Structure formats: C-alpha cells, structure tokens
Image: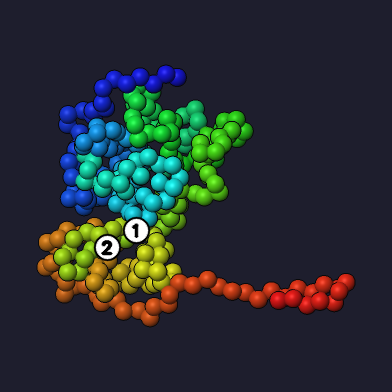
C-alpha cells in the first residue's frame, strides 16, 4: 500500500489538546481512564508526528512519563521514544481523539475483526506519512478470542517475524506487561507527594509499586490490604501518599489527619540462590 502525505494530521477541532504535556500530567493520566481512542504527538519545532491508539488512553499515555519505559522502547526501535528522550516531553504537543468508553472486556477480536480504535489508527497510517511511526501497522493488546477463529492463519500473530512479532527478541513490551498486571489485579495504586500533594505516578498492581521502591512484593500487598480493611482513604509512606482511588490536591491537603502512616519492615528485593547437587556415577564426582 502506498502511503501518501496529505499535510499534517489534525484531529477534529473539539478534540482535547495539550501544548505542554508535563504541566497537564494529572489531567492526561486521569481524565481519559477507561476511554478508547487515538492520540497524536507533534514535535513543535519540526512538525514531525506520531499517532497511536489504546483501549485505555490514560493508561497508555502515562507510560510516556516513565523514563524506564522510554529507554526500553528506544532500544527496541521506537522513534517517538527516542525523540522524547532527546527533546523532552514538553517539546511535543498532544491531541486526543476519544471514541467513547472502553469496550466490554468480553468482546472478542481477531485479525479479521479489529477494535475500532485500531481501525481508526490504521486509517491515519494508510493516508499520512508520520515521521515517528516506523511501524506502519497499527496494533493493540486487545483481548484475543478463545474461539477457533484465532487458530492457525487466523491468529493475529500468525506469520509475524522480527520486530513485527508480538514478542521481539524474546522480550515482552512494557505495555503488554502492564496489561497483564492490570488483568491480574482489580485495582490501581496512585502515588502523590506528601509535601506538595502533586500526582507522581500510578501503578497497575501492588507488584509494580513494590518494584518502584525496590522492596519485596509483600510491601505492596500489605499496603493494599491496609487500605482495603480500614477506613483510611490513603496511607503515608515516607514522603509519599498512596491511595487506591485518584485524589485531588485540595482533598489531600485538607485530610492528612485521615491518612494512616505506613512503616512496615522492609526487605530489599534480591535474587534467590538454590544449591543443586549433582552426582556423576561414572566418575563418582559430586558437584554443587
């Protein structure tokens, strides 16, 4: 298929847009939760663009605020991630095209029945040449159907190789990992500064929160149980406020006395070594 350039991509005039994404981080990470659609990043000076899509726009866009995610994606060939690292997120403007709330999880999709936000994403890729879209095929971590339609040549990943494959270099993408975490847990954790009350980051599971603090998994699990089994809307840990629901600055600043202080015994994460004994009957040699 020939991709033709028809000027620059522009979403409908009533679409939400942000000239300085860093200053609008809280709004971007919360206002579009559970809403599907497309997003458009435009480098202000060069006009170079990138288009993407997601079943949960806030969840997807929050990844661009994570340095670790950008670094990983840049090593995997993501032109937009490399550009954001080089220029800074505020050198890009962001436009969002919402297609209503996310579809029900029970909806089944296949290579012949793609979600509407993926179809819309692909239509832009087919008609415009966007400099940062190295991959010209729109994709998504949508829920695959469990029916026979996904078997053999009908499987969305059938025949895909190299960077086109869902798992490239035997490494799953951070976006895919994030979706797995969300599927395993029924909650999202939100972290704020206990000094400025500004939103810092959200985590799709207790495990991801534990990884952030580089402590054992039990840390995040205990914290979640404390909130769920008490009357506290949030807990204070060191210089952070952590909750299971999004909270605004006014609520945080005026309700600190309602928060529990969380000071668990922390165990740093570490690898586990297991001694394995082997015996060679031929040489009667014992190794550990």
Left or right side of 114 for 37: left
Q: Position of residue 38 (x, y in %)?
A: 31, 35
Label drawn at residue 191:
2
**Quarter the N terminus occupies:** top left
Asked whether 254 or 174 is in front, the reply is: 174
Q: Which quadrant of the figure contains the C terminus?
A: bottom right
- Residue occupied by mark 1: 203
Instruction: Decide if residue 11 is on the left or right side of residue 223.
Output: left
* Relative depth, front residue between 243 and 94: 94
Left or right of residue 25, residue 102 in this image:
right
Mark sitting earlier along the chain (1/2): 2
For label 1, count other residues whose C-alpha is less than 10 Å away and answer few (under 14), some (14-19) or many (20+): many
Residue furthest bottom in the image: 265
Please say if 69 is above or below 2.
below
Q: Position of residue 181 (x, y in %)?
A: 43, 55
Q: Are marks 1 and 2 in contact (CB under 8 Å)?
A: yes
Q: Quadrant of residue 194?
A: bottom left
User: Is residue 196 positioned above or below 118 on the image?
Assistant: below
């Amino acid at each position: 298929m020939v991709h033709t350039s028809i000027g620059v991509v522009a979403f409908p005039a009533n679409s939400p847009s942000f000239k300085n994404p860093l200053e609008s981080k809280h709004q971007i990470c919360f206002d579009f939760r559970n809403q599907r659609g497309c997003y458009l990043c435009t480098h202000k000076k060069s006009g170079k663009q990138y288009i993407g899509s997601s079943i949960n726009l806030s969840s997807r866009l929050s990844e661009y605020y994570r340095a670790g995610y950008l670094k990983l994606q840049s090593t995997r060939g993501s032109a937009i991630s490399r550009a954001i690292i080089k220029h800074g997120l505020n050198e890009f403007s962001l436009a969002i095209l919402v297609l209503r709330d996310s579809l029900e999880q029970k909806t089944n999709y296949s290579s012949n029945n793609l979600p509407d936000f993926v179809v819309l994403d692909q239509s832009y890729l087919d008609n415009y040449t966007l400099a940062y879209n190295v991959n010209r095929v729109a994709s998504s971590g949508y829920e695959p159907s469990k029916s026979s339609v996904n078997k053999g040549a009908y499987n969305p990943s059938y025949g895909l190789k190299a960077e086109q494959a869902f798992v490239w270099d035997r490494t799953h993408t951070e976006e895919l990992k994030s979706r797995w975490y969300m599927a395993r847990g029924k909650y999202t954790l939100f972290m704020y500064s206990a000094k400025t009350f500004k939103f810092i980051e959200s985590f799709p599971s207790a495990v991801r929160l534990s990884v952030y603090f580089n402590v054992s998994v039990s840390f995040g699990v205990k914290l979640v149980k404390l909130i769920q089994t008490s009357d506290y809307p949030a807990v204070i840990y060191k210089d952070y406020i952590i909750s299971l629901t999004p909270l605004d600055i006014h609520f945080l600043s005026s309700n600190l006395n309602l928060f529990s202080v969380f000071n668990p015994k922390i165990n740093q994460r570490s690898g586990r070594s297991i001694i394995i004994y082997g015996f060679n009957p031929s040489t009667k040699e014992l190794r550990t």
